[in-house]
Image: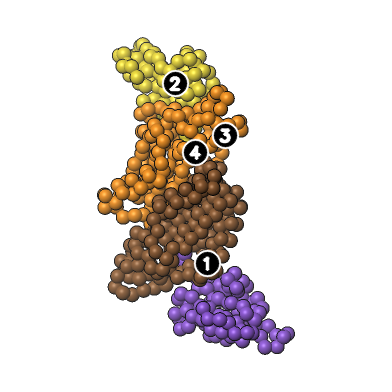
Chain colours: A brown, B orange, C yellow, D purple
Amino acid sequence: MQLRIDLHSTCFEPLEVLERWQTELKGLGIAESAAESLFVGRVRDTAADGTLLEALELEHYPGMTEQQLEQLAVNCCNRHGVSSCLVQHRIGRVIPGEAIVLVAIGANRRGPAQRCCQELLEALKHHAPFWKREWRTDGSSEWLSGNTPL
Amino acid sequence: MQLRIDLHSTCFEPLEVLERWQTELKGLGIAESAAESLFVGRVRDTAADGTLLEALELEHYPGMTEQQLEQLAVNCCNRHGVSSCLVQHRIGRVIPGEAIVLVAIGANRRGPAQRCCQELLEALKHHAPFWKREWRTDGSSEWLSGNTPL
Amino acid sequence: MAGLSAGKIRILLFAGLREQAGWAEQQWPAAPQPDSVLTPRQLWLKLHLPGALDQQVRVAINQQFADADTPLQPGDELAFLPPISGG
Amino acid sequence: MAGLSAGKIRILLFAGLREQAGWAEQQWPAAPQPDSVLTPRQLWLKLHLPGALDQQVRVAINQQFADADTPLQPGDELAFLPPISGG
């Protein structure tokens, strides 16, 4: 199973990252998967209270974050028997429209690819030590106490 | 809702198509979606009977295919309230590793994006008039009588 | 596809069904009397097509899925669709 | 983060919990007697930290999620994690 996890402290472009990942797998002689399921999450332009959002601040627990992401990914990928897994996550200050998270799963069948992509996204949302603080355009800020609903 | 459906009679690169789609939406002044769920299906290198596959031939019903894809996409997107939908499908001779289908759904939340992407993929697999014929490396060929299991 | 003669129904076959039947398209006269009815199911039997209608083969009239017992109108495009395998 | 003195436990707070408590990190002596026990739950109370342990705040020991009643060892890194919101 091919696994790659990166934390980005500056803006990343999902399509560029995916292209590099594709090239990397090709370089390892790994054939393209029959099924690929992907998810990209971006920052909204409104805060939870409906006011305009200036930026999202993403704090994390250095060391534990990387370990947790790897454990969650390995468990999920093994459970579904998929062949490749790319996870990219932002940290630091992220502005509306920028990508926060990218999950890309390659598998031999669409079912495992889709289920793994979905489950890993939920797992990292709830079990990787990230915290979001909303910075509103009026200068006020608030830590979020959970995730947006499914 | 932004909708784009294309049939490709030659190889298409999912990441290039996605980049053009992103640029097109940006050109229309449409903000990037908070959640994007994508699926890419590619031709396997083995036939259903386990022998090596030379190519897949994709026949379709011109006219009905386009209408059906549009109906399926509009219904699915409306049901889930998503904001953008890109469907790309190959026709003709497709060789192993090449993309057959790409579905990309943009929505304000991950649940609708993921469910719509999955449901639309199943819908087009079962209700758009496409037929696959496997051409094996020994020169023999066979029409498939259904889809691979989930 | 060729132009359709007046009062005819165009019948299309695809993929494996086309190859088993040995033809891709033909025309058939619509119901001759004004009060008589011609359905895809009747045509399926008259044409001795292989396989099981409903179970395996679906019907499309004017490029929309339709019931096999729908009365056909002159000028209709009727297609018999073997099991679909897209995506 | 600063080096850890021998026989100590390093305690870390994050995000909203760090701001409410007013500190990010401190060290605490591990259990003094060899047969006594110190747990995250005991430290949570001793430190008068805000919020509800278990319901809202999770515990990590040496960067792995752990039960709040796990006995702590000298040199352990203990973190109290407010509700996570990643992805």
Distance CA(mark 4)–CA(mark 2): 30 Å
Label 2 neighbour load within 10 Å: few <14, some 14-19, many 20+: many
Mark 4 is on which residue type?
Gly
Q: Which chain carries label 4?
A: B
* Chain identifier of the residue bearing label 1 in the image: A
Give the crowd class for mark 1: few <14, some 14-19, many >=20 residues within 10 Å: some
Asked whether disc 4 touches disc 3, contact meaning CB atoms under 8 Å apart, the reply is: no
How far separated are the C-alphas under marks 4 and 3? 11 Å
Q: Which residue is drawn at 36% across and 74% down?
A: A141
In x, y percent, where is residue C20?
51, 18
Give percent across and percent down for residue D14.
49, 75
| Circle on res. B97 | 4
Residue at mark 3: B46
According to the picture, the residue beneath numbered tag 1 turns out to be A65
At horizontal 40% and vertical 48% (from top left) the residue drawn is B105
Give the CA distance from mark 1 to mark 3.
39 Å
- Give SS at disc 1: helix
Secondary structure, mark 3, is loop
Q: Residue at x 59, y 85 (%)?
A: D5
Look at label 2 and name its amino acid: Leu
- Residue type at mark 3 is Thr
Q: Residue tagged by mark 2?
A: C13
Q: Nearer the viewer, mark 2 or mark 3?
A: 3
In this image, C21 relative to B1: left or right? right
Disc 4 from disc 1: Cα separation? 34 Å
Provide the secondary structure element on which disc 2 rests: strand
Image location of residue A143, percent across then percent down: 42, 72
